Image: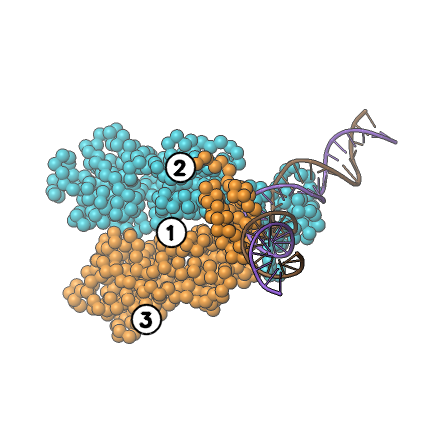
Chain colours: A cyan, B orange, C brown, D purple
Amino acid sequence: MPDQPVRARLVDVAREAGVSKATVSKVLNGRQDLSVRPETRARIHEVAEALGYRPHSGARALAGASTHALALLVPSLGNPTYVTISRGAYQRARELGYLSLLAEDFDGQEADETFNDLVKEGRVDGLLIASARPGHPLLETLRRSPVPHVFLNRAVEGSGRNVTMDVARSSVTALDHLHELGHRVVGHIAGPAGITPSEERKQAFLDRAGELGLLAVPVASGDFTEEGGAVAARALLAPTDTRPRVTALYTSSLAQAIGALHAIGELGLRVPQDVSLVGNDDLPVAGYLTPPLTTVAMPLYDLGTAAVDALVAEIEGKSPGDVVVPTEPRLVRRGSTAPPAEPGGRPD
Amino acid sequence: MPDQPVRARLVDVAREAGVSKATVSKVLNGRQDLSVRPETRARIHEVAEALGYRPHSGARALAGASTHALALLVPSLGNPTYVTISRGAYQRARELGYLSLLAEDFDGQEADETFNDLVKEGRVDGLLIASARPGHPLLETLRRSPVPHVFLNRAVEGSGRNVTMDVARSSVTALDHLHELGHRVVGHIAGPAGITPSEERKQAFLDRAGELGLLAVPVASGDFTEEGGAVAARALLAPTDTRPRVTALYTSSLAQAIGALHAIGELGLRVPQDVSLVGNDDLPVAGYLTPPLTTVAMPLYDLGTAAVDALVAEIEGKSPGDVVVPTEPRLVRRGSTAPPAEPGGRPD
DNA sequence: CCACTTGAGGAAACCGGTTGACCAAGACTT
DNA sequence: AAGTCTTGGTCAACCGGTTTCCTCAAGTGG
């Protein structure tokens, strides 16, 4: 095969196949409103293949008002959670004939620039928004210039287009595990206030604690970072007169768990002998912490695929709706959880 | 300001400003080959601003053969190193009027699909390639369909378009630190064979070890992952008759350091009392490991900006060349390094 | 006073696709 | 035999910019 210094264009394919541009376009796009002889159809596909033809996305967008591209907006790529989600989105988009782009909106700080670059300049047909929160600038922007979009992971109440996971179930899974081990005083490190999965996880945690009859369930909020986890852990583990000592912690993110692990060590406590720790989200690093982290694996990849399904459906004219990914959170038992020490066996 | 249900187009701006499309286009693109009255110029800018006008990237690409977009190809987004690089690239691109897209090519496995989606479909003007390695499919693809591109982090020998950091210096920095502390037997966990920064770091490590007169400097290679670091650490720490016991390790990535830390613990050794550990790249998590990790901070952000500078220069017609980011690697001392134990003080 | 330059901007072709309207020729119906 | 479908396509307008000539009026030199 010779080199292809110039991109093959639609006319090139048409000339080579001995048909018109229109026919090639319709055949390659699989349109039904046209009858073509099977052999012509085959010839067109062959020629296109041989020439390595790819339609120019700009020309396509101009003519058909569709770019066949989506963009996923995440609050931070430093959080590997979103990397997994984006992989799911990318693959599913590909299967549906779309390209999924990835953009970091730094928790809303650059959301409008990103919106301009991607939507207003016509680079994408729709947005997968994983960075929503109350007061996010994009919410207002979308109201004024409506564009197909769904919210994933973080829901926007009343939007009717939220794609989420069963985070309530993850709290139950984590808490049941700790309860079975014998823990009766369990702290929860929640995410920042106002962010849906944060609130939901916390509420489910408190509800389940009530059902199980736990003695105390203190909660502290913190960013989804190591720092946030460390600060919150210190707050929860500080000695107090008003309740018994916490023997286990459940965090909202993996980074928080790493921070908590650090803070626990600094306080001279050991995991899991003195404090058990359960994280959220399972990523390779969880297995390499000391001790390896017991965690609730959330269906992040599936969340990405589900969000793309919902968005593409909307782009193709169906009306959106809320979706909950059916895959259940799964407990991954590692070394950071164990039965609590005998009361009095190792007094403070 | 009223809502803008439809995108404003060039003609809209032209009509509103009372001039022709051509004039608006030239004024907004700041072209010199046209004389326009200052007040006309100002009016055009005002109208464009008021209408929130953004040129349609597809139309622009079609007419002018430039998309004003770049793409950064990274081997894995799970490696936070590339996240920092991409942030540098994104910001610098923005300053130069470009949009930087981010794509994961899974170490070359999806490189050709990505190339088709981004380059052949005309979505970007050039590529920032951080995932190069010998035999990478993109190398051949680029030979056949030349497109502006630079290689960053991982160089391609003889390409004459490599943007790299002073990795040799990072080995020296790490090794000097360990030598000063008194270590004389230092192991190195290198990256996979054949990848340039890997080889270069290793060679510089060995060279510097020779200059310092170290007793032994065993090297093991492994992926840039926790797993790779753990396996390599086990190999280096295994007892042997042929050389004294290793008292310190220097790894090629942060994830490797986390893996090594894990393996060291499993072997019943303590950091830094029994083994000192120096990592590469400084990211938030490094400060929250137990113990906090001493590491060589590489100028990742600057690497991203430098790569964009080089690529944009090439797109604008200048011929490419190799660039080394001038920012020096910097040692961040934390708790994972200390003087070695007295010989015999704690025998194996 | 007239040809000529200069300043300010306009007309139209073009980029590479998509799409709805249209058409020729054979098959079928009556 | 004439009209009507159906099959298998084609034609040309259009999407929203950019760019290359043009034009036209006012000023300028001779």
Q: Is D15 or B174 nearer to us in this picture?
A: D15
Q: Which residue was labeled with disc 2?
A: A139
Amino acid residing under circle 3: Leu
Q: Earlier in the sequence, mark 3 or mark 1?
A: 1
Quadrant (top left/top right/bottom left/bottom right) for the C terminus of chain B: bottom left
Label 1: how many residues lie within 10 Å, few (<14), some (14-19) or many (20+)?
A: many
Q: Is residue B187 above or below residue B265?
A: below
Quadrant (top left/top right/bottom left/bottom right) for the N terminus of chain B: top left
Label 2: how many residues lie within 10 Å, few (<14), some (14-19) or many (20+)?
A: some
**Residue mark closest to the camera, 2 vs 1:** 2
Q: Are marks 3 and 1 on the same chain?
A: yes
**Secondary element type, mark 1:** loop
Q: Is residue B329 above or below residue A72?
A: below
**Secondary element type, mark 2:** helix
Mark 2–mark 1 distance (CA, rounded to whole Å) = 29 Å
Q: Is residue A346 above or below residue B82?
A: above
Residue for point 24% across, 66% down: B178
Q: Which residue was labeled with disc 3?
A: B206
Residue for point 38% across, 55% down: B88
Mark 3–mark 1 distance (CA, rounded to whole Å) = 29 Å
Image location (x, y in percent) of residue A211:
25, 28
Q: Which residue was labeled with disc 1?
A: B78
**Secondary element type, mark 3:** helix
Answer left or right for B241 relative to A101. left
Q: Is A242 or B100 nearer to us in this picture?
A: B100
Answer left or right for B39 relative to B199. right
Image location (x, y in percent) of residue B9:
53, 43
Q: Chain of mark 1?
A: B
Mark 2–mark 3 distance (CA, rounded to whole Å) = 55 Å
